[in-house]
Amino acid sequence: MYYKGMLDDARSIAARDPAARSTAQVFFLYPGFKALRMYHMAHWFQTHKMYGIARYISQRCRHKTGVEIHPAAKIGKGLFIDHGMGVVIGETAEIGDNCTIYHGATLGGTGKEVGKRHPTLGNNVLVGAGSQILGPCVVGNGARVGANAVVLSDVEPGATVVGVPGRSTKREQEKIAPAQSLDQVHITDPVSQELCKLRQQLLELERQIAALKPEDARGYYERGIPNNR
């Protein structure tokens, strides 16, 4: 049962990664998949209260792959840890099915609280390179976290989060989940949209001021608008 599940995961990764040449290549050579195999071993010992062995395996995994997954984390089917290096998944983190996590991402806590203190990812979530999802927030099904974003609160299903701190925007319904398409380029940026709106408003104000007659301009400044000459 264990090997069948791991083989299914390898096939899922091979189907989603354009660089993969075969399922065997994923199974034996991908560091993210190796980290996943070692996590499942560590998790088995963790659930059987052999905590020392579980932590030893997880630390061996960290040294061998650059991926640190706490043995108590809960991970669903089809997780794709692409490139792997620098990924951290905390003790109470929960990850749904068919998610994708890029290198440098962290699913971490925000303090020394006990109990649930790490994020929960729904199904088909994409977590971009270098992004930080911190605290017991919930990232909904089909959501996308942009590269280097910092997420501290819940994310709605199907939303995209970008920036520091993360700002969320809804996307048009996609036929393919972001964790399957792996698209990190065509992401709506709400910060950029707001800046574009402000720029358009500034240009319109400049046009209106330029169209004023000299006597209108004098009245314009006399009404309390400062002259910055």
Image: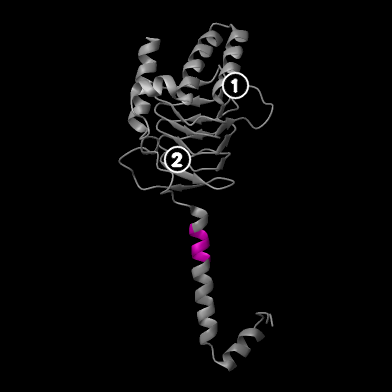
Tell me the residue at 52%/68% (across/down).
199
28 above or below 160? Answer: above
Q: Give, as a three-letter code, the residue at label 1.
A: His
13 above or below 52? Answer: below
Quarter of the image for the C terminus: give it.
bottom right
Q: Is residue 195 magenta?
A: yes
36 above or below 184? Answer: above
Q: Return the residue nearer the eye: 47 or 33.
A: 33
Tell me the residue at 50%/25% (across/down).
94
Please give the residue where the numbered disc 1 appears in the rendered image: 63
Residue reaching furthest to the bottom: 215
Mark nearer the N terminus (1 vs 2): 1
Q: Return the residue nearer the eye: 94 or 9.
A: 9
CB contact under 8 Å: marks 1 and 2: no
> Which image quadrant is residue 11 in?
top left
- The disc at residue 144 is 2
Q: Give, as a three-letter code, the residue at label 2.
A: Arg
